[in-house]
Image (tube, grey):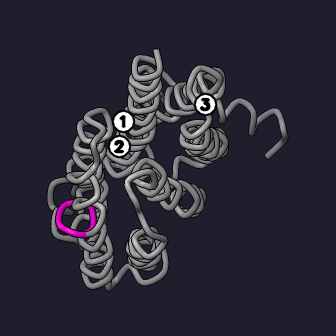
Amino acid sequence: MSNLGILLDATLRAGDYIGFTFFTGYMSMLAASIFFIVERGTVTDKWKTSLLVSALITFIAAVHYYYMRGVWLETATSPTQYRYIDWTLTVPLMCIEYYLILKPAGAKVGMLVRLIVGSIIMLVAGYIGEAVAQEQNILWGVISTLGWALIIYEIYAGEASKLAKATDSEVVKSGYNVLRWFTLVGWAIYPIGYMLLPGNLLSGFVEGIDMSKSSPVDLAYNIADAVNKIGFGLVVYSIAKGATEAEKVKHA
């Protein structure tokens, strides 16, 4: 096919709502990155790293969405490899955010290690089940869910939860509670999308769908990415702004 033909095939078609979510995901996460970078100058020094990490999360996702939208428009296939590369970088960064906001309360590196180990198990097992050993995707999905469960345990009953309860900052307490809801409820969209894969537990709901025109898995992933990454960053931003204002009042 000529380069002109590829370009024409890469045009967003009317009714291609999956392609639409790739475009909106790309632009919204790029806009969020710019916002976090600009706002970084409005918070105290100890919160600047948190906003930088938020900007990195959405910027990395924006770059990958730029490539993923191209894959979808040109081939109408799920850009699985690009998506997992994105998650391999951004999910551990989201775990680092927990560490950064709790560091003033005494968070130890061990807590961060447990969160990152959980994220690695979740992502590696998920990739194997989705792209390498699809005939065993239920088994690998269970292993992936165990990694997610390790993170949930840490933020709801482990060291992270205890530190959040012990902190004297009400801003951190309330923000932490919202962040862990993102991890519990928002991240749950990913295993739901995973279970829609052929041969998995929810595959019956999408049987008969022409995946060259519609991909429920990509729709679930795209919506979850935009909500979780941007929303997660906005909560961190609200914590940083609230803590900054509290410090100004304290020293006034």
| Residue 77 within the magenta-colored segment of the rendering | no
In the displayed structure image, the side of residue 63 where residue 80 appears, left or right: left
Q: Residue furthest front?
A: 252
| Residue for badge 2 | 224
Closer mark to the observer between disc 3 and disc 2: 3
Q: Is 167 rendered above or below residue 27?
A: below
At horizontal 30% and vertical 33% (from top left) the residue drawn is 171
Q: Which residue is mark 3?
A: 33
**Amino acid tagged 1:** Val
**Magenta region, residue range:** 154-158
* Residue 31 visible, this angle: yes
Pointer 3: residues within 10 angstroms few (<14), some, or many (20+)? many
Report the mark closest to the observer, 1 or 3: 3
Instruction: Say if 251 sits above or below 77 in the image.
Output: above
**Residue under the point 79% across and 46% down:** 1
Residue type, mark 2 in image: Ala
The answer to which of 151 and 238 lies nearer the viewer is: 238
Instruction: Residue 39: give x, y in percent of width and height.
Output: 59, 21
Q: Amino acid at mark 3?
A: Ser
Tell me which label, 3 or 2, sits earlier in the chain.
3
- Residue at 40 percent across and 48 percent down: it is 218
User: Looking at the image, do the residues carrying marks 1 and 2 touch, with CB atoms under 8 Å apart?
Assistant: yes
